[in-house]
Amino acid sequence: MLSVCGVSSIEELFDSLPPEVRLSRPLKLDPGKSEYEIVDYFRERAAENANGYASFLGAGVYSHYRPVLVDTVVSRGEFLTSYTPYQAEISQGTLTAIFEFQTMVCQLTGMEVANASMYDGSTAVPEAAMMAARITGKDRILAARSVHPEYREVLHTYAKHQGLPVVEFAYDAESGEVDSSALEAGLDENTAAVIVQTPNFFGVLENVDRLAGIAHRRGALLVVVFTEAVSLGLLKPPGAADIVAGELQSFAISPGYGGPYAGVIATKEQYMRQLPGRLVGETLDSHGNRAYCLTLSTREQHIRREKATSNICTNQALIALMATVFMTVYGKRGLRELAEQNLAKAHYLASGLNTRFSGRFFNEFVVKTNGRSPEEINQRLLDHRILGGLPLGRFYPELNDTLLLCATEMSRRESMDRVKEVLI
Amino acid sequence: MRPKTRQHLSQNEPLLFERSSPGKKAYQLPQLDVPAVDAVKALGEEHVRDEIEGFPEVSEVEAIRHFTRLSTWNYAIDHGMYPLGSCTMKYNPRINEIVARLDGLAWAHPYQPEALSQGAMSIIAALEAALTEITGMDAVTLQPAAGAHGELTGILMIRALLESRGNPRRKLLIPDSAHGTNPATASMAGYQVENLKSNGRGMVDVDALAAAVNEDVAALMITNPNTLGVFEQNITRISEILHAKGALVYMDGANMNALVGITRPGDFGMDVMHLNLHKTFSTPHGGGGPGSGPVAVKKELEPFFPGPRLKRSVDAWIWNYDLPQSIGRVRAFYGNFGVLARALAYIMAHGSDGLRRATMDAVLNAIYIRKNLDRYYDLPLDAPSMHEVVFSDEKQARRGVRTGDLAKRLIDYGFHPYTVSFPLIVKGALMIEPTETEGKIELDAFIDAMISIAHEVEEDPEMVLKAPYSTRTSRVDEVSAARKPVLRWRPQPPAGKAAD
């Protein structure tokens, strides 16, 4: 090979690099390690994390059972080691699965079109806000304080340099729902989008139809965010929304210390051309067989460059595939049964506890710690190998005597009884 | 040589929704150990949905066959060479999948106590340190979820730094050879784009650059080696020109696979850069994600990192949220941790020598392809290239065959096509990046295929125009897909012949 290349050593191939930029020493990294040593290192690190704890943490990341089919499918090299499906003729597997994903996201959310996935829920929210601004030609964004605090932080980061002022509005201190008078007061003729989450960060359900009415009367779009996708097995889909932006982590995606996850963005057909990211569409091949391909790419950065709807390039194909397999395994009846189990567990956990809000909840709720500090409660639970709830004071100073607790189908009755014992 | 491919059966499979029949199930839930709750009572009638219309109902074996059949319709690195230029499709070691799935890592909740997250935090710290050393920069954030996300993070940091000096400035300079994400990122960060024309050798024209840089310019976004695979000869001079006017240099690290262990962006004047862990550091592309786009910066930019930042207290790792100058979060939590663990495993397996060796092999492979094919395909720019080579379809276009057609014919030879029609500065580009993964046997088979196609174009261009012939799906009508978009299944007979 060297002689074909006209050199006598590989080093000569780098002769075109100016000498002053060449690294004259080896990188200061350890020598290469064997497979065994690498597994050993990661096992040691894994052992330093929580292991074997019962968990009541939710707050945007949920511990649901992962059916074994999920990893069986995504471990197939044909899915794992393929690229973005630009070459449709040899990518029909990925393309078909994404088309099924887009369809199921629509069926779940009550929207008409969905894209091939976003990085995660938190980045889907600013993309939805930017989309609303393009559609309405307005710039102001109203976001409920009961939207996930970290999602709102990401929204602020993105919006700042887009010239989109973001104003937050209050939740009702009693019910935990959006304060609709605060929303009405906050709306003006320049408002592009109202962003709410349901179930919201406190686990409380919002009345999407009513909020859509309020937003639409002032010419704003309603963006509905979700973080707990399992709730959609039981809850009425947010069909009155204009854009739905959510997170599918609940669908067999490991909590994984925060990622990778898969975000979704879905909307009405009329706004299809304002969607960011990849879209898969149905077509025919030259023999008249049904086939799929990436489509409407004139929205995207590789064609439109600075005029694109977003700079997003990739989606989260493999993670979206996990969610697709999950939705397939549970299916129409299973997803509902799963949601019913979550509902039953969380309501069992909440019974007898001093809940902070009166609004309806699915599998997550806020509980008062009755004069003790949330950290103290959590410390006592850790002694029982239980990860307690999220102390909300970190994000909401006015709620510094509360914990956000979540129960799923994986929560056992005896752990829940222990939590109640410590809390009461 | 024995051909790389031979036909075999490929199973038909309908969509899940067509496969579905009422009452079938693939799940098993445990017995409920608490009283059941009436959904209507608990949630209110207005909140409870009807059944999810159209959602599939299949058995477990139907589910696994469905996805297995679909999988066989894909090409993958595990099948063979995947020479997509700029995409760095290298082998994905399976050990990386194992370590990312260890229970203590996969089930770690981002809000579990820091004292019970020390393992995950150590992994993040170790990767930050390794990438700092590899890039020659001063600090790294692992929060961005992908390359384009890293670009946005890096440019927002540049804006924040310049703002802190009194003026964020208005423009970014971007060479015409850049990836589309660069100008799209500039817009998202509130900057205007000024395109820089490349010189006759595909490099930044230093005089044109010097003329373009003024007090309005915030930064230059440069890819090095550039999208032609050519190392910018004047990179040090380029950074001096920007710095002299108080502007910065952002490096798109998409092509870092040509540099690791040989040279470091931090040592040639780059101020901010992103890496693509799914390219250079072998984490699987998964059909288009997940990725990870760490951003590495020089010291003066460190205060502007998105938060939280990892910090060492006396005897433990903690997350520091007290970052008054931060640009703010770009993503919830701490980044695509599962991807980070895989990248660290790759770096550990290679070590210092192995990483350098991988770079050298990647460059050797690309030049070997270039030298073998330059008689058959037009090489529009003769500058020495590194890890990828860009040809043009000029010779074949005379016979009416374009780069996209050649790519489709390559499929019949058992290869994934190269990158088609990019970079835009080369008319009819064929952009080929073999990576270090390929050995001489696979490279020679690829070269033979490309030469054979060049002959076919001379002998029978019509035949090439209708390729591929050996795939279960023939050439796909992308024009109709865009003209009448069908983006979801609906319960009605499909428009075409129901062949699957």
Image (tube, coloured by chain):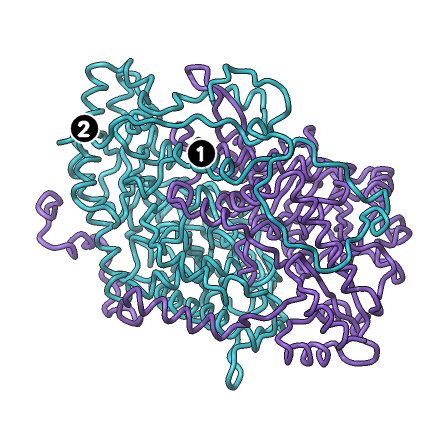
Chain colours: A purple, B cyan
Mark 2 highlights which residue? B451
Q: Where is residue B219 in the image (x, y as percent from the top left)?
A: 48, 54
Q: Where is residue B273 in the image (x, y as percent from the top left)?
A: 43, 58
Q: Which of marks 2 and 1 is in front?
A: 1
Relative height, residue B267 to residue B222 (above, below): below
Q: Mark 1 points at which residue?
A: B70
Tell me which amino acid carries mark 1: Leu
Hey, what amino acid is under mark 2?
Ile
**Extreme-bottom residue of the structure:** B314
Q: At numbered mark 2, what does the secondary structure look like: helix, strand or loop? A: helix
The answer for how far apart the CA atoms under marks 2 and 1 are is 32 Å
Q: Is residue A283 above or below residue B275?
A: above
Tell me, yes or no, if residue A88 can be seen here. Answer: yes
Residue at the location (67% across, 80% down)? Answer: A379
Q: Which of marks 2 and 1 is nearer the N terminus?
A: 1
User: Are labels 2 and 1 on one chain?
Assistant: yes
Query: Disc number at residue A368?
Result: none
Q: What element carries label 1?
A: helix
Look at the picture and state if B67 lies above or below A72: above
Residue A82 sits in which quadrant? top left
Residue in the image at 47% along x and 24% along y: A291
Q: In which quarter of the image is residue B421?
A: top left
Chain letter of disc 2 in the image: B
- Residue located 42% across and 48% down the image: A75
Residue B343: x and y, percent? 39, 60
